[in-house]
């Protein structure tokens, strides 16, 4: 029995080719040719090519003294003639070789009033030139010149009007350079190796949601017999790198129906109305190939809240969004096109876009769990030769919080590092290097002074020691004073499990860890350094969220306070008044400061209590620059959080 997906693929027509632009046609070329001929005529008329302009005195000398004039024609006050031999230009300076440039053989001169009144001039010319002298009345070409210039002006206006009319017609018919109003949607062609659901790991729940759509397109009667209808829209939401676009490509590979994709930013152009025109063309193209799937990536580029921005107003983006709303569930019903969209900012989307009837299903593509990360490692390492010491389960456990894109990048970095060292297999050390590079940044070639190295060693030892002796902090994996990325050192923690919720005590412990580096600097050197800027910024942000978002302040109570950072649009933040007083804002600042001071004081006390371990770790860190978990255990004893894994 033939596969329905194969039959659908055969029946679907090939992608339409763009219409050639009718802008540059035969009439346009004739118009441009006429303009060129008129320009050549004017140039030839106004400038006597190859004719030198000379003075009347020079003309008389060449005529009487040198007898170098072959013939002349006098037209009123102008004299046109030809020399027997081209004379030297009297006004030109000699060149580098000492020779002076010569005039053209043909010349023109203007008779001064005194020459026009001299009756002897005519006699001299007749005597000298005889048959080669002619005198004629001056021609009045004023009417001809005016007529030509008027013809050119009218021709330019008519030509420009003709071109603009052509451009307008081409613009709205999709002919101007491919058509601004053409959507530019790409029809997915799977090729030899189409992406399928088997190529996606760690997203089983999401794949189940999308598999239902694929089955509906393949066998709609199975669902329609009970009155079910396919969802009109599916919105994929998730952090960057979680696999939203990859899922859409898998749907294209599995569905067996035409699949069109476009990026949300491609709708917006500098011309008014282009976005809405592209939406219409996009949906018309998809309907012509129905049943079909339309995928809009990064839909937040065009689907944001209407009325946002300073002054609100109706702009091109809103007009485009209105057209999308109308096409998805407007007055004209459409049951044959399924719209898929992806975004990592669902909070900024317009509510009208999210309602049932447009995007019926909101599918959250979350970061993978431990089981999901293991499956992703297995998928991306299928074509990578692994050494026997590689433990994918250990790698999955040590990459909590990484997305599928991060894991793919990690495997690729490990393979590149092994290839650089001419290895036949990728071993565990290559994966450790790739993980450190991904989590802590690439190594820098900076050379620290002894003072900077000592202060950095105590700073990182302060973080590491607190992670070692304070319960509730994630397991310490490695501490280093090798400059990486934008930091002079790093203390790497590896969570033992995936967390979706966290308590107040654990948050306070996290504040304690973040401020441990500053506390060590103050304890040892009695001063702070600028190297703790990132720690202080993260701690302040965490403390403020504890107070304003999670109600973890006894003075303020269980109240959430909206912050200006909650709205990504300046216009919305300006339009909505702050819902708490200046006094409350002051109390919020005081509570944030209190949380930070309490954490800093507690960190200082614990480091004082274990000063000997702090000194030992810092001294050893200065010597070897990097300490991992087993080495730290040998140095200061086992950790209170988790025993070292060998």
Image (tube, rainbow, N blue to C red):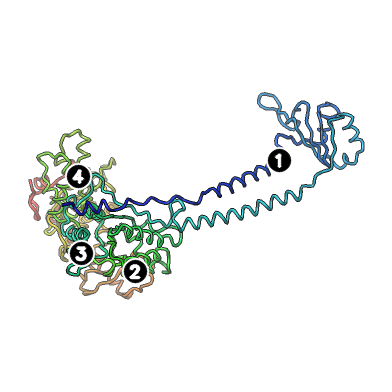
Q: Nearer the viewer, mark 2 or mark 1?
A: 2
Q: Position of residue 564 (x, y in %)?
A: 33, 67
Q: Nearer the viewer, mark 4 or mark 3?
A: 4
- Image quadrant in which you'd find residue 337: bottom left
Check the image and report above or below for 418 versus 460.
above
Check the image and report above or below for 508 versus 78.
below
Check the image and report above or below for 242 versus 50.
below
Residue underneath mark 4 = 411
Asked if the residue under mark 3 is in contact with the one under mark 4, i.e. CB atoms within 8 Å, the reply is no
- Which mark identifies residue 332? 2
Q: Position of residue 120 (x, y in %)?
A: 92, 35
Q: Nearer the viewer, residue 2 or 598?
A: 2
Q: Position of residue 411 (x, y in %)?
A: 19, 44
Label 3 crowd bin: few (<14), some (14–19), many (20+), radius 10 Å: some
Q: CA distance from mark 3 to mark 2?
A: 62 Å
Left or right: 163 in relation to 301: right
Residue underneath mark 3 = 598
């Amino acid at each position: 029995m033939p596969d329905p997906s194969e039959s659908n693929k055969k029946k679907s027509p090939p992608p339409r080719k763009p219409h050639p632009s009718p802008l540059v046609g035969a009439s346009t070329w004739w118009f441009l040719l006429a303009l060129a001929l008129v320009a050549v005529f004017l140039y030839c008329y106004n400038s006597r090519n190859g004719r030198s302009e000379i003075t009347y005195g020079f003309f008389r000398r060449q005529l009487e003294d040198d007898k170098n004039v072959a013939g002349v024609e006098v037209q009123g006050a102008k004299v046109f003639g030809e020399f027997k031999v081209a004379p030297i230009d009297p006004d030109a300076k000699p060149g580098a070789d000492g020779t002076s440039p010569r005039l053209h053989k043909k010349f023109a001169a203007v008779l001064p009033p005194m020459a026009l009144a001299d009756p002897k001039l005519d006699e001299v010319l007749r005597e000298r030139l005889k048959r080669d002298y002619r005198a004629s009345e001056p021609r009045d070409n004023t009417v001809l010149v005016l007529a030509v210039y008027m013809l050119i002006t009218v021709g330019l206006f008519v030509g420009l009007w003709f071109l603009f009319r052509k451009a307008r017609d081409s613009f709205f018919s999709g002919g101007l350079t491919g058509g601004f109003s053409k959507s530019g949607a790409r029809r997915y062609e799977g090729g030899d190796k189409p992406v399928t659901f088997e190529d996606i790991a760690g997203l089983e729940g999401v794949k189940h949601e999308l598999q239902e759509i694929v089955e509906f397109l393949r066998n709609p009667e199975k669902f329609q017999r009970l009155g079910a209808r396919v969802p009109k829209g599916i919105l994929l939401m998730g952090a960057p790198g979680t696999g939203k676009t990859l899922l859409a490509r898998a749907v294209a590979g599995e569905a067996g129906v035409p699949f069109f994709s476009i990026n949300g930013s491609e709708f917006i152009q500098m011309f008014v109305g282009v976005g809405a025109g592209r939406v219409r063309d996009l949906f018309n193209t998809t309907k012509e190939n129905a049943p079909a799937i339309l995928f809009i990536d990064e839909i937040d580029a065009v689907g944001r809240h209407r009325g946002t921005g300073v002054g609100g107003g109706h702009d091109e983006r809103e007009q485009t969004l209105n057209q999308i709303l109308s096409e998805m569930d407007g007055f004209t019903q459409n049951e044959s096109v399924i719209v898929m969209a992806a975004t990592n900012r669902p909070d900024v989307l317009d509510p009208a876009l999210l309602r049932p009837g447009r995007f019926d299903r909101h599918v959250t593509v979350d970061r993978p769990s431990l089981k999901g990360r293991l499956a992703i490692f297995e998928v991306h390492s299928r074509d990578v030769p692994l050494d026997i010491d590689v433990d994918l389960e250990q790698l999955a456990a040590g990459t909590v919080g990484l997305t599928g894109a991060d894991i793919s990048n990690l495997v690729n970095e490990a393979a590149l590092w092994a290839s650089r060292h001419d290895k036949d297999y990728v071993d565990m050390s290559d994966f450790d290097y790739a993980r450190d590079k991904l989590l802590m940044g690439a190594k820098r070639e900076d050379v620290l002074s002894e003072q900077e190295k000592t202060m950095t060693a105590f700073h990182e030892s302060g973080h590491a020691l607190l992670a070692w002796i304070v319960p509730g902090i994630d397991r310490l994996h490695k501490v280093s004073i090798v400059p990486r990325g934008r930091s002079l050192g790093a203390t790497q923690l590896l969570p033992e499990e995936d967390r979706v919720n966290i308590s107040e005590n654990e948050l306070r412990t996290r504040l304690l860890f973040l401020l441990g580096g500053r506390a060590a600097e103050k304890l040892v050197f009695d001063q702070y350094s600028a190297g703790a800027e990132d720690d202080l910024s993260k701690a302040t942000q965490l403390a403020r969220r504890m107070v304003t978002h999670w109600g973890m302040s006894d003075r303020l109570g269980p109240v959430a306070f909206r912050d200006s950072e909650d709205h990504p649009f300046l216009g919305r933040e300006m339009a909505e008044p702050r819902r708490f007083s200046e006094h409350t804002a002051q109390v919020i600042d005081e509570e944030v400061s209190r949380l930070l001071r309490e954490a800093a004081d507690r960190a200082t006390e614990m480091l004082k209590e274990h000063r000997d371990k702090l000194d030992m770790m810092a001294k050893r860190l200065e010597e070897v620059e990097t300490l991992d978990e087993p080495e730290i255990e040998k140095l200061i004893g086992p950790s209170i959080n988790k025993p070292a894994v060998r």
